[in-house]
Amino acid sequence: MPSEYRDSWLSNAFVFWPLDWIVLVFSSFLPHQLIHRLRKHLLQLFGQLDAPSQPAHDGSPHTTETLKDLLSQPAEIAREYASDTPPPREAYRLCIFCRNVEPTSKPCPKLETGSTKSVLDLPPKMKEDVPLSAADETLLTWLQTQPSALCTRCRSYDPIKVFKFAEPPDTYEFTRDDGSLEAYTQDMRLHALELGELRHLTLSASCQFCRLIYRILPSTPLPPTYKGVSIIPFRAHHRFPNWEQFPLQTRTRSAILLGLSFAGTVEDIITRRHYSSSNAGHFGNTVGPAIALAVEDPAVKRKRVKGIRALATSRSKYNGRLVEPLIDFESAKEQLDFCMKHHQACNTTIPDELHNIKLIDVSMIDVSMMDLLKKPPTIVPYPRGCHYAALSYSWGRTGVDEQARTIDDGIIATKKLGLRYLWIDRYCVDQQDREDKVRQFAIMDLIYQCADVTLIALAGDDSNAGLRGVSQPREIQLKETINDLTLFTLPPQADFERQFSKWNTRAWTMQEGMLSRRKIYFSSRQVGFSCQLFSSSDAHDSDCFFPSSIGHPSDSFYASINSFRHLHEQADVMEIRRAFLYMDVVTNYTQREMSYASDSLHACQGMLSALQRRMFPLGFEWGLPLRDFPITLGWTHVPDDWHNGKALYHEHQAPGRRHDFPSWSWCGWEGNVQFSGLSLLISHGPRKRDILSDLELQFVSVQDKTLTVNAWLVDLEVRTDAFSQAFAYDSAQHAKGPPLGMVRDRARPSVQNAVPSGKYSCLVIERQKERKGRNAHYSAQTVHLIVLDWEGEVATRRTSITLFADAGFMVAQPRQRLVRLQ
């Protein structure tokens, strides 16, 4: 490296620190605009306004090769980047598209060739938070060994000053006349950092704050022309679910964090009016990765600059914290013990059926020799009244006979939590004995409900991923020192990580999470504890407990089913509520993936058993509560992209059939299921309407896969000349009269003419007649039907349709009879 650039860089770095101290002293009483001008004049005075421009490349290795190439040549790196010969300031950038270090004088190779893909180009499952790669970890760790100083943009932004002076609101429920919105607007303009169009964004490899920004930006790149990313301050408590329940006095003392906003420019953010409490505080920037100030750092407490020392005590609640690469199990054990002793709502009685299970005795395992032995663990019958943990994980492609890392880590974690026994499906259920599997499936709800805690593996795609932080280190939290203060990155909010994990997409794991009283989540970045009353994460202050979320079925299911202990006393009151819970469970379950079609019903048997014990004493017929709610036979598929882009089929395709199950049940088909449009929901839901329902089917019996119902049948002819219209036809098979109305395929409502022309035999689920006013007549008619295919006297389900019968449905002369379905 030419000596003139080395010397220039060194002198720039040497001059910079005194200037920062001068500016910081003046910042306590000068306006923000004057501070920026003061810094500019001081730099001009010393002749160090800008870093030297990038010299022409001389063919040296570090100017022509990527960081990956450099890391493979440690001797060359030592010579080229020795501590006494640092590179020019801002000469290299961190490319958010290549995820590498590149010379600032050269364009990004991926942008130049057009090979970069944004999250808008990726399939739905990739639109999520991607873990930090090993190459990124190596890159950031290596850069921290090099001399660093803030770049021009970050010096102007001054993140330390933002932590000191920013006053984001403790709530986002603004009113129109108290000035709160104007105060928020002014604070946002002062303390937001717009990153501009991403293809022109330069993150300096030698700038500490640029490295922090690089760490929290999505590793799956955004569109290069996107201009809507900003760094904005917000209160730490906004990261937690149900933060509105936090005491006001603690919310006003909440720590300040810096997070990403993808809403647009600062002006775009400001123009969003949040007057409604229904959406208060639920911003995208509050749950993703963030940057925190370590207020517990001794350097902060010793700081004599006005305002910084007070920051350590005045705004420190709910702050993040740096975690060790390996988990502190003492803290996790304290939370578990506290809940077991003091949370009555989280305790349960042990039923007699549980005595049929088997457990792993982890006390018989020497964890120090586990990798050497690799033999099956010791399986024992359930010791009456024992305490045990359960393990929930994604099997992936590992075989039944393979002892994977997740299982090894589960054994270690169980011992460190002070428990002796562990339940793992791979060993505690005989995978070769079909009858034993059926018996265990029937009590799966009891196995997870009675476990003292369920260990949940969020990281990775299979059982070899392990429980991060047990035997393998977690992802790094990037820590940088700016003006003697420590700034560090926080992982996404724990529930956000759970939501976008592979574990959360698997069919089997849904009931394992929903049925557990207490859960410990192991992600690649943090450990989260959750019970029926509170949740916490080791990435936040140890005293930071917050109410458990009730926004997801997995968080409310256990409490809901236990509210039905006296079902016979509340049957009339709870009738609709239990139907809603069942439908919500099925809708969420059918969004998930399974490796084997034969697991369609087995993977949710635990949830159905729990519902039957508490809420549906008449049981289920192939997953449907037909004895309680025959109308649920009117389930239908959900179109593509209706559920977070996780549908299993496209609108132009029909859902696949699972032939081991009856056609009339949702478990006999692939794809997402819903119950929308049925009068049970319309008459009692949040948007209830005045509906009169008739022609409803009645349940008669089920024998094996054959269902018998007493229902109305109707013959229709559909024509798709311009629109899908239905006509009644006579005994001579000729259409008669005007069209009855429009027909829509309920599984693909946005596809025009999805129901092809033809003659159909249909079973009526119900007819709905609606009136628009109290004194009006019931006029508009909506009829939900199942299209049937007949083989002799037995029918199978083909699809479901809706008929909007403006002319009166009874013109089609429906007839009532017993119908057998398979």
Image (cartoon, grey):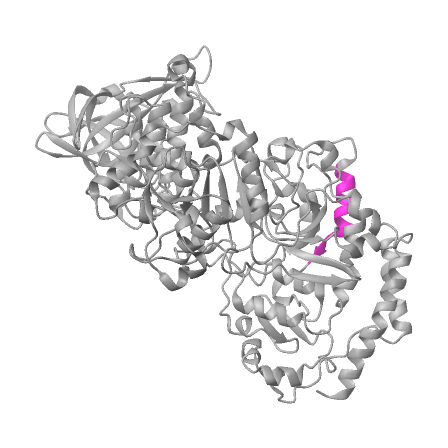
Nearer-the-camera pick, 48 or 375: 375
In the figure, residue 704 lies in which quadrant?
top left
Rendered position, 83 above or below 643: below
Queried whether the magenta region covers residue 552, the answer comes back as: no
Q: Position of residue 382 (x, y in %)?
A: 34, 38
Q: Residue at x 52, y 49 (%)?
A: 497
Nearer-the-camera pick, 173 or 17: 17
Q: How many marks?
A: 0
Instruction: Say whether residue 767 is left or right of residue 296.
Output: left
Q: Magenta part mainly helix, strand or loop?
A: helix
Queried whether the magenta region covers residue 190, the answer comes back as: yes
Instruction: Say whether residue 392 is left or right of residue 818.
Output: right
Q: Residue at x 62, y 78 (%)?
A: 106
Instruction: Say whether residue 155 is left or right of residue 782.
Output: right
In the figure, residue 821 lies in which quadrant?
top left
* Quarter of the figure with the C terminus: top left
Rendered position, 302 above or below 541: below
Q: Position of residue 538 (x, y in %)?
A: 60, 48
- Residue 632 appears in view: yes
Instruction: Say whether residue 107 is left or right of residue 308.
Output: left
- Residue extent of the magenta highlight: 181-194
Q: Position of residue 151 (x, y in %)?
A: 75, 68
- Residue 99 appears in view: no
Q: Residue at x 33, y 38 (%)?
A: 604
**Which residue in the rendered view is the most extreme toward the left?**
792
* Quarter of the figure with the N terminus: bottom right
